[in-house]
Image (spheres, rainbow, N blue to C red):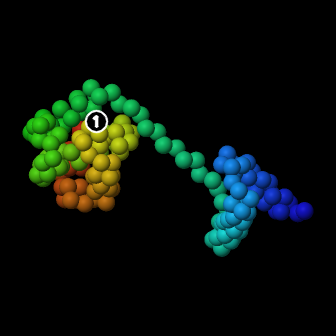
Amino acid sequence: MTKIESTKFKEIKLAMKAGHYSSLTKKEKLIYKNAFKNGYRLAKFHISKTKQEFKPRKIIAHSYSVPKDKVYLIIDKVCQRYQVSKKDLFSKIRTQDVVRVRNIIHNLLSEKYNMNLSNIGRFFGQDHTTVLHSLRMKHNKQRFWDGEQTIWQEFQELKEIL
């Protein structure tokens, strides 16, 4: 057995140790084994095609829980600055001034405090995809965040103050 075959065999054996593998029927095990081999072969083909050495990346995601009182303090300061009532902010109102303030708060909580999308959305009674859209607007420089707007300087000032 060559070194490559030995490595492949070890990886297949490791895959067969998966917790759910032992509960499979003989036919399901055969399908699982063949799918793993084909996936391995396909991945190897794509790596050789791009001629890049595969370097696994570490996925690091930190989500810190920020105390509620701190979040409400941030919301209060931003509402005062833009003269928007908290009642309007937490309601379903979608006027431009309210949406802009929500957008700023979403970005502040995400960038400064690394809060995840679901936790940010919970404060406003919104889905995580709404918060994601808000963050993407800033990233793609759309609507409130285009280059001609003053929101960039305002955002940096708020980020430093808070």
Name the residue located 73 percent from the left edge and 52 percent from the top edge: 16
Q: Amino acid at mark 1?
A: Glu
Q: Is residue 12 above or below residue 19?
A: below
Q: How many labels were placed on the picture? A: 1
Residue 10 visible in the shown view: yes
Task: Answer few, some or many: residues within 10 Å of disc 1's Cα (few below 14, many 20 plus, some between 14 and 19).
Answer: few
Q: Is residue 142 above or below residue 51?
A: above
Tell which of 2 and 137 is nearer to you.
2
- Residue 137: x and y in percent read 28, 56
Name the residue located 12 percent from the left edge and 48 percent from the top edge: 93
Task: Give the SS element for disc 1.
Answer: helix
Tell which of 145 and 68 is nearer to you.
68
- Residue 68: x and y in percent read 29, 28
Name the residue located 30 percent from the left edge and 48 percent from the top edge: 127
Q: Is residue 10 left or right of residue 126?
A: right
Query: For mark 1, what is the residue?
Result: 160
Residue 108 visible in the shown view: no
